[in-house]
Image: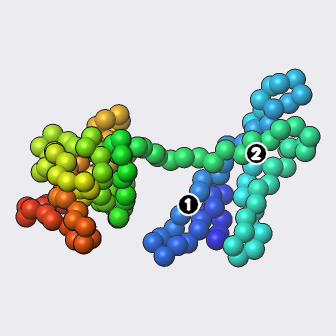
Amino acid sequence: MALGRDGSLVIETALGALVQPVPRTWKVAADGETRELVCSFTLLGANRFGFVAPDWDGDSRLTIDPDLLWSTYLGGSHLEHVSALRVDGSGVVTVTGYSASTDFPTSIGAYDTTHNGSVDAFVSRLDPSRTGTAQLVYSSYWGAVVSTGAMRCRWMPVAW
C-alpha cells in the first residue's frame, strides 16, 4: 500500500492498482448540524491503514464515507455468476459469466435474446460514461451451460 499524491490510498494487486479516493468525512455536532471535516488516510504498516481527522473532537459522531466511483446492477431475477470482468483503457467494462435468469437483460441486435437452458452463458458490455440504460452497450446470452461444465455455443464472429 502507498499514498497517492492526492492523498488517495493505492493498493497494488496482481491485477493492477486499486485506488481508493480520499473519503468524504463529517461530524454531527451536539446541535444536530452536520459539519464537513478534513480526513486523510494514514499507513499503519505494510498491510494496514487508518484515518486521521485532525478537527474531530472525539465526542461527536464521525462519519467516514468512502467514494464510490461507479456502480450498476446487471442481472435478472435468478442466480448470476461472473466468470470474468475486464475494464479497457477507456473505462468500458466487459463481463462474462452465466445466468439462470430468463429475464437477464439483453440488448437490441443481441446474438441471442432468449434463455436456452437452465443456465446460460452471457457476455455484456457496459460504458460508465453513459447515463441510465444507455450504459448497457450490448448484452447477449451466449449458449446453454451443460452439466459437464462445458459450454454449448453457436459459432459467431466477434469484433471487440
User: Which mark is in front, 1 or 2?
Assistant: 1
> Quick one: 69 or 122, which is closer to the camera?
122
Q: Quadrant of residue 106?
A: top left
Label annotation for residue 19: 1
Label 2's element?
loop
Query: Is 5 situated above or below 25?
Result: below
Rendered-image quadrant of the C terminus: bottom left
Mark 2 Cα shell of 10 Å, populated few (<14), some (14-19), many (≥20): some
Q: Circle 2 sits on which residue?
A: 38
Residue 25, x across and y down, in percent:
72, 42
* Kind of residue indicated by mark 1: Val
Do we see residue 139 in this rendering?
yes
Instruction: Look at 7% across and 64% down and name the residue there.
Output: 155
Q: Give the residue type that dot 2 points to.
A: Val
Q: Image quarter for residue 89?
A: bottom left
Observer-nearest of 151 and 38 = 151
55 or 29, nearer to the observer: 29
Q: Secondary structure at mark 1?
A: strand
Does residue 90 show up? no
Name the residue rendered at 73%, 64% in the picture. Answer: 49
Q: Residues within 10 Å of mark 1 (few under 14, many from 20)?
A: some
Question: Residue 46 location in percent, x, y?
Answer: 70, 76
Observer-nearest residue: 30 or 109? 109
For the point 37% across and 59% down, the residue is: 82
> In this image, 146 relative to 72: left or right?
left
